[in-house]
Image (tube, coloured by chain):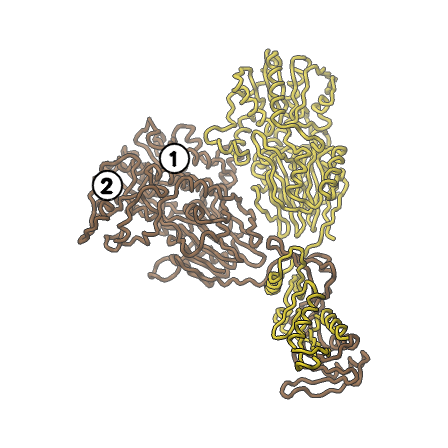
Amino acid sequence: MKLYCLSSDAAKPCFVLSFKELLIMLDCGLSAHSVLNFLPLPPVPSTRLASLPTYTPPHINDPLLEGELKECCGRVFVDSVPEFCPPLDKVVDFSQLDVILISNYTCMMALPFITEETGFKGQVYATEPTLQIGRFYLEELSEWLSEGGATGEGGPGARRWKELVHLLPPPLAQAVRPRAWRRLFSAAALARSLARVRVVGYDERVDLYGALDATAVSSGFCLGSANWVLRSAHEKVAYVSGSSTLTTHPRPINQAALRGADLLVLAALTQTPAHNPDHMLGDLCVHAALTLRAGGSVLLPVYPSGVLYDLLECLSAHLEGAGLGGVPLYVISPVADASLAYSNILAEWVSGGKQARVALPEEPFPHAALARAGRLRHAKALHHLPDFRQPCVVFAGHPSLRFGAAVHLLELWASNPAHAVIFTEPDFPYVEALAPFQPLAMKAFHCPIDTSLNYSQANKLVRELRPRELALPEQYAAGGGAGRPHVGADVPTVVVKRGAAKAAAVRRRAARGTLCGALAARAVPREVAGGSGGLRAAPLAAELRVRDARVELVAPPAPARAAPLHWSSPDVEALVRALAREGVGSARVEAGAEGEGGSIVHLPRHDTLVHVEPHATHVFCEGRPDVRQALRRALAACLPHV
Amino acid sequence: MPEIKITPLGAGQDVGRSCILLSMGGKNIMLDCGMHMGYNDERRFPDFSYIVPEGPITSQIDCVIISHFHLDHCGALPYMSEMVGYTGPIYMTHPTKAIAPILLEDMRKVAVERKGESNFFTSQMIKDCIKKVTAVTLHQSVMVDNELEIKAYYAGHVLGAAMFWIRVGSQSVVYTGDYNMTPDRHLGAAWIDKCRPDLLISESTYATTIRDSKRCRERDFLKKVHECVEKGGKVLIPVFALGRAQELCILLETYWERMNLKYPVYFALGLTEKANNYYKMFITWTNQKIRKTFVQRNMFDFKHIKPFDKSYIDNPGAMVVFATPGMLHAGLSLNIFKKWAPYEQNMLIMPGFCVQGTVGHKILNGAKKIEFENRQVVEVKMAVEYMSFSAHADAKGIMQLIQYCEPKNVLLVHGEAQKMEFLKDKIEKEFSINCYMPANGETAVINTPTKIPIDVSLRLLKAEAVRYNAQPPDPKRRRVVHGILCVKDNRLSFLDIDEVCEEIGINRHIIRFTSTVRFDDPGPAVKTAEKLKGLLTEKLQGWSITISDGNISVESVLIKVEGEDDSTKNIYVSWTNQDEDLGSYILGLLQSMVQ
């Protein structure tokens, strides 16, 4: 068994596990940190962004670099369409992948990079909400970027700067392998890729080519989020990615299914270990209420699903309590309507409390009621809201602030200190996200809400699950700076880093098959004395049927004689006596060749020699079958056998 | 041979109520726990005393599985769990768990408050009962205990209806509940994978019918309704609150819209909105089309269909009313029927099956006068139409399902004896598998092949695969492996001989025999060997015979030729003890060649 790591971002993992002749990809996260190096892509042309000064590195005069870099408040940005950092494609040939298992919608954004135009022929499995909400995320991204003509291969982008990265000022200089960055896929590639996904339910056993069973079990992180358990009759691998032990809206984590694995792969822990999500939610409500009361509006750059539902629920209740019940809440996203409607039909995927509401029957999430009451409005884009009222709370993407409606709102509100922007998504450092909008007069708050496991929760989980071996991305391992939180367990640990493969200790010895009753009845197992106790054995000749990698042992039509097993060595005296009983007398015993400790039994009447050695008996005889049978019987009588 | 035993306590050669006992591998499972709508006395509940004459029932039943929310499948559940005292696990899907208590409560009200029955379960009992239910999702494998596993498949009969696959050890059964193999206006078609169960327990309500295409039936239905209301008649459609009602509502709604009709359409029950809400929230259980379009327009928001009020019964003029319950055995639909039946211009459309003993059943059988309690007699002059909209599989559908899942045996329930007989014949002929149809209280016993789980050594398999792949491909070639069957702590493994020796720490002792044949064949020894190989290849077809350095080997048999060029050769034939048969055969062959 081998584990490859293809992603440098532990929160957007991508592993490949090779096991039982299968190549199984675990998640395909897309690292979007790279987009922070680019200038924002405003939905409405912005004069401020267009008039930023061009940057040229000192002492460099490269005409090809002309206009590729712009400067804003001392930071250099690439003036081109944003690019993403997909999983490494040099280590594993994507056309050889058999299966892709997706744990949740935040870890599947690179799917089209893997499945389209790579010769990929395998299967992709995800839960239904993962597919649907993942579709919202991807379509939203694709729609924003295609508005700016920034998907697919169309049009040349800035490229020259990648050759000169080492000469550029930080943080651009620290960009990791910018030459591997890619533009977002086209909408068509996205649709093709999502059409490949096969939907599974929690605890549904998916048969992977007869070799393994894969089961998605609830991970408690978001709607439809799953940990995957790969199981054969003798081995068990658990992939724990994006899990949460907190109580929020999704179904709680199923820990029992992960217990006792031979290998536990741990990924996508919290990105903000220092922030408690509950406190952050409280802070957020307070900041929002204060801003609104002072007549300012609040912008929350968010994804179109996930924590958004909790934010809507908590914030609306808090504002109501603060006497701000009349403040409109807007959700602006190309997929807002679908996301809000869809969340309310996922009764089977939500927590017990929300499920109980469905039995009434009421929607599991209160935002349907908020929408009916007119407090919550949603729109595809800002200009679809003719009666946009302020002060208000706007939920809009993208959290990186490089594209989407949030860019436009930030441009509008940046100079007004009454307004506030509150960052809740943990994927991007907020200071960097805001950099191209500097100087900024509006307030900025950082209240990251990441419900994924933190390090102490992860350590506790590993202790409880008792895997035989643990695999971690290097970011989570001990070492590299004292005091840095890490996952430490008293089990053998394999640390993997991007581009590397590590062998795990799991070794296979047997396959599980079935034995048919008729054949079982034929075998008469006998106690094996001398061996370790309690073992019974019988020689068996079976017809082997292998179908879909399943092994079946059935009775052969013509009963083939099973090969007996003899062990130990015969006592020569006993052999001579046994031979006499069989009617083969007048045996002479001679010492064998010197140094070997064997002996030779000579049967002159039958022209036969029996060489008896510690591990073998060799009979030289003339062709008479009756003598040979007698010899066999005699040998069998003085050798233990089954 | 291991057995599977099935005893229907209901639904054995009848359609009244489903309750089937299944035992296999030491587990007892109750499939559905329905009540009979045609009876008002204790006969309406299954005879639980069959399971245990007295004493606790929980120890006798490992789990109860409910296929869908119709009362003839779940009606006796509160009775069983709260009054008989069953405390074990109960499984059903999420929509069933949400909707069943409402229908149960509805029925309880009719039985207790209208008919004044006693010894019936209370509202609280229904609530307590539903609390004990474990909800399952489609395709989820649920381990009831270490050995018993169940899994639900989509059945398409009503919202949340499921078929269940049940496995104990190597034995498996599929129970269909009620299912529908053709997608309709709001539900998809039943689906199951090729799970090859030992037994398929299938409903057979429409065992002999091959229904005409759905479109025709729909057109027929709309035409009849339209004609009736055009003439000023009133149309009564008795339905159950959830299920067919929604399909017919969608149908009428779109027709009314298209034809721009203004006649009032009513849905008679406070449940309407609530019922439609369930559909909205469990939209993942409806068909593809509704699921795809629900964000833009929810199909269950009806514009033309208004709630009904009792006072409308006597309103003059045309109208269409959907009223519950569906079999005209009680409640509002029966009240409306009594009022409207004596008038010729009115029409009754029965869109589903009626159980024996109900008013609906009598009318469908052509009764022109119905007697009620208190000597009330109603003359039936209104037109009566029966249109089968019940979402059951027809004969074609049943055969299709058998084809899908490839069972080794089929057992028919939930149908009438004669019709079952016909279908049984058909199944046995077409699939050459056994088909059973036990009556209530009768037990069907099905033998299944023994399959014992065993661990097969990879070393053994790999060695065999190498040998097998070395030969020219032939899918019919039998693959025989030799090894040692080991039993330890009740676990079986099949190992290579050397592995066994390592495992238990013994030294293997090999016995080898060598015989010499003298052969007068001038020429170099290599030539002789070639000649022998030719002979062996001819005689031992299907064996792999190799020759290297003048030594021929077949399995463990070695043949070596020695001797000077122009003299008699010594042919040594040597084999190990386990290849005695082959060795002695070859020796015999060479001896006869020499002579």
Circles 2 and 1 on the same subunit = yes
Residue A100 against residue A586 in the figure, above or below: above
**Chain at tag 2:** A
On the image, the x and y values in percent for residue A521 come to: 74, 60
Amino acid residing under circle 2: Leu
Residue A329 against residue B147 in the figure, above or below: above
Between circles 2 and 1, the one closer to the viewer is: 1
Q: Earlier in the sequence, mark 2 or mark 1?
A: 1
The image quarter in which residue B232 lies: top right
Q: Residue at x 49, y 40 (%)?
A: A353
Q: Please give left or right for residue A290 compared with residue A335 in the image.
A: left
Amino acid residing under circle 1: Pro
Kindly identify which residue carries mark 1.
A334
Disc number for residue B222: none
Kindly identify which residue carries mark 2.
A440
Give the camera-side residue of B422 and B370: B422
